Image: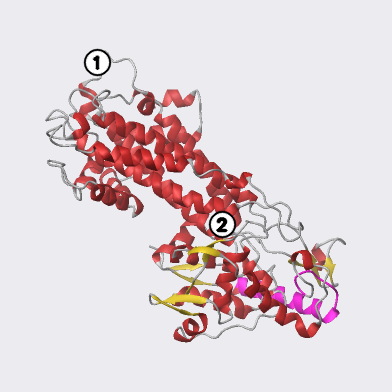
Amino acid sequence: MTDEVVVDGESLTPEDVEAVARDGASVTVPERARESVRTSRRRIEDILQAGEPVYGVNTGFGELVQKRIPADRIETIQQNLVRSHAAGAGEPLREPVVRAMMTTRLNTLVKGFSGVRECVIDLLANLINEGVHPIVRSKGSLGASGDLAPLAHMTLVLIGEGEATIDEDRVDGATALERAGLESLDLKAKEGLALINGTQLTVGLAALVVRDAERACRAADIAGAMTTEATMSTTASTHPRINDVRPHRGHGVAAENVRTLTEGSEILQSHADCDRVQDAYSIRCFPQVHGAIRDAVRHLRDAVTVELNSVTDNPIVFDARNVDAHASGTEHAAVLSGGNFHGEPLALPLDYVTSALTELASISERRIDRLLNPNVQEDHLPPFLATDAGIQSGYMISQYVAADLVSTNRSEGRPSMDNIPVSGNQEDHVSMSAQSALRSDDVVDRTTRVVATELVCATQALDFVETGLDPGVGTTAAYDAIREHVDFLEEDRPVHADVDVATALIKSDKLLDHIADVLDETVA
């Protein structure tokens, strides 16, 4: 586990975000990034001295862009901006999501194009390191001009207002800062806008979605391999020559995972020459389906990695020597207004991943049915994997729950296809990227639980395979990891606890770690 993450504006990864957000890693800003921050602030000071009208520095915001702000009111408007934009609704975001949002906001500020003072980045870093977590309402962002309302709720605490949690206590912002030994900020020109204008709720949550989706994909390959063995199916469909003639990357990875997991399987060898010609699609085609889902998740990872290390506020402050005449500013500082806050580059791949994860849950649910359903399951498997079917229901209702989760996933919709103009029609096209991130987060959670259900059912099914026939080395390791925490279902019991445990094994990486220890390699 990483104890400290260097936030330099250039190298932040989804793994780094997760380390800070979930594992409590601290953050540190290196000197080279600090110098970029100081240089950027000097450019803002140069603009203020010159008195040129520059959006976000000495003008109003949004539809009020034509309003020129007197010099003695510039600091007031920055404070007012934060207060007025903290208009969110809904339940507060979970603390890990808030930590992800603060970390990603810090990373974009230290790139040195936002014009904030060094004390701003120091306070934001200290909030993270001291465990001061602003209460951030989850609803209200349109993903353009970035995640305004959520970031405003975050920023309230920096000015000693709003609410935060510290040591599990919910207190007002001023009290939280005092308990952490920190002092609030009086925001200067550009700083309020720089703190709230950007895609940091979207990208912070998307980074966590990437990590969880990758876990779900690996676990689904494991579950599918176990189901293949338990249903006396074949892994012939994972032969590398099949992928060679249709060389999608994800397909190749999924197929290789199954071959690795089932290597040495006596179960597969026992019926290698049987007269079954082909297996059902949910088993025969899952390398192709899982592979397509992996490719979607990789697309999101690529977009998130770029976004994590990008400048997403507006306007952006440059060295005047590197910008042409389209900029406003002075001979030393050039300010360009643009749309880097627009969340579309994340909204579309997030919606793509939401669809992909829904398919992962869907095909896993179909395999669960093949393990449980007496109308389609193999003769060696009892109905619903109950030892005394009829008297007992076994895992029957687990499939009901999986079906509900799949159906709920399908109802999520695609927020990026929506648009409602705001700010007097100045902001007439928005991305809804935060909605896309929040829904993708919900979908990956449900999908992981469906896959966990398949793992539990496949483990139970393997216990009904003919005595003396062992699964593959990797699938045996997966079986052992489940059985260490979930007993064989001898008599009916509340089986939600079985799936809870398997879900936790996936999310904590303990399932993957156990298999990696046995195989001396990890599931890709």
Label number found at residue 305:
none
Extreme top residue here?
275
Residue 225 shows in the view: yes
The quadrant in which residue 330 appears is: bottom right
Amino acid found under the numbered disc labelled 1: Cys
Label number found at residue 202:
2
Q: Is residue 431 above or below residue 80?
A: above
Q: Distance between the residues labelled 2 and 1?
A: 51 Å
Asked if residue 38 is among those painted magenta in the image, a careful observer would answer: yes
- Image position, residue 183 (x, y; %): 54, 86
- Image position, residue 245 (x, y; %): 50, 23
Pointer 1 local density, CA inside 10 Å: few below 14, some 14–19, many at least 20: few
Q: Which of marks 2 and 1 is in front?
A: 2
The quadrant in which residue 351 appears is: top right
Q: Which of 50 and 33 is in front in this view?
A: 50
- Image position, residue 208 (x, y; %): 47, 55
Amino acid found under the numbered disc labelled 2: Thr
- Image position, residue 332 (x, y; %): 82, 73
Q: In this view, does 91 lie to the left or right of 302?
A: left
| x 63%, y 68%: residue | 196
| x 39%, y 33%: residue | 363
Pointer 2 local density, CA inside 10 Å: few below 14, some 14–19, many at least 20: many
Q: Locate the N terminus by quadrant.
A: bottom left
Query: Which residue is disc 1 drawn over?
Result: 274
Q: What stretch is highlighted in magenta?
A: 32-57
Q: Is residue 143 above or below residue 285?
A: below
